[in-house]
Amino acid sequence: MELRHLRYFRAAAEELNITRAAQRLHMAQPPLTRQINQLEEELGAKLFERGPRGLTLTPAGQFFYEHSLQILEKLDTTVTAVRRMVRHNRELFGIGFVPSLFYGQLPLLVRGLRQKDDVELTLAEMTTVEQVQALKAGRIDIGFGRLRIDDPEVEQEVLFEEPMMAAVPVGHPLDGSMPTLEELAQYPLVLYPASPRPSLADIVLGLFRRRGLKVEVAQEAHEMQTALGLVVSHFGITLVPEQVKRQNRDGISYLYLAEKHITSPIVCSRRRGEVPSETMKEANAILKVLVENRISGKYP
């Protein structure tokens, strides 16, 4: 599958007419039809229903459209950033992060670096495992995650340990308490992210298993926001890092745990042995202040 297949599919999905899609792409209709057919064969799924009035997306086609659109939009954003970087002679600096960290002080680091005229920032949501691979491939320069991963090409620094909290629906029997893990294990659990693993989901499961507690996993979600939505829907409860409580989502109570030592690390990953650029030096300086503020209890 090539990028042109995604662009051809997007045009057909938005026009829902092969003739108009071909005109939009400045190509003849038969080649476009062949490309769409090839895409369907490669996917092993029918993307369109053909009718006398044009095309309609199948459920598989709608799913593929939504996700392929994200890929194309990300590509367009990256191309624009690279062109801007070259035009203004800027350094490209990539940051990878797990979503839960963006509720804390990470935005302050981003804001500080954005004030530099000679830097073009790129941000990417990714798990710690994905961050390590992205660092080795040169796609990002620094990553912020929650897993310790042993890799000879990447150095990791634990910035601080963040308390874990229980997220329960408002009115839950545990609402207003400081529950123990044993009490939490009595209720269905929502885990996230479902993939790729290992992830925060494995950290949470390990907390229960090390204490000999069995839990019922009611649902696995790919994103934290989906997991919280499932909590609001009374699918189950979940564990979240402390920073998440700052979003004040309706329908959820965030409870500190009785076991104060239950935490999740904030792990900073960088390429090992690399001479830091001026931007990396500035990032490290900003990061040092932010970590000191967090440890001392000074929130932004």
Image: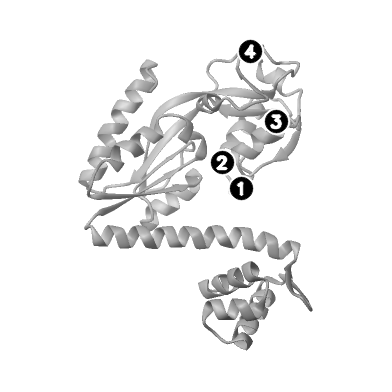
Residue 135 at what x, y percent from top left?
A: 38, 51
In this rendering, which labeled residue sits more in front, label 4 or label 3?
Answer: 3
Question: In the rendered view, does 201 fall on the left or right side of 82?
Answer: right
Name the residue tied to disc 2. Answer: 199
Q: CA distance from mark 2 to mark 3?
A: 19 Å
Residue 281 at what x, y percent from top left?
A: 23, 40
Residue 127 at what x, y percent from top left?
A: 51, 45
Amino acid type, mark 2? Ser
In this rendering, which labeled residue sits more in front, label 2 or label 4?
Answer: 4
Name the residue tied to disc 4. Answer: 178
Few, some or many residues within 10 Å of mark 4 (<14, 14–19, 20+):
some
First along the sequence among labels 4 and 3:
4
Vertical position of residue 89 compared to residue 238: above or below: below
In this rendering, which labeled residue sits more in front, label 2 or label 3?
Answer: 3
Amino acid type, mark 1? Ser
**Residues at marks 2 and 1 touching, judged by CB atoms closer than 8 Å:** yes
Q: Quadrant of the C terminus?
A: top left
Q: CA distance from mark 2 to mark 4?
A: 25 Å
117 or 26, which is in the foreground?
26
Amino acid type, mark 3? Val
Q: CA distance from mark 4 to mark 3?
A: 18 Å
Q: Is residue 38 visible?
A: no
Name the residue tied to disc 1. Answer: 195
At mark 1, the secondary structure is loop
Name the residue tied to disc 3. Answer: 231
How is the structure coloured here?
one colour
Amino acid type, mark 4? Met
Residue at x 71% of width, y 70% of height = 47
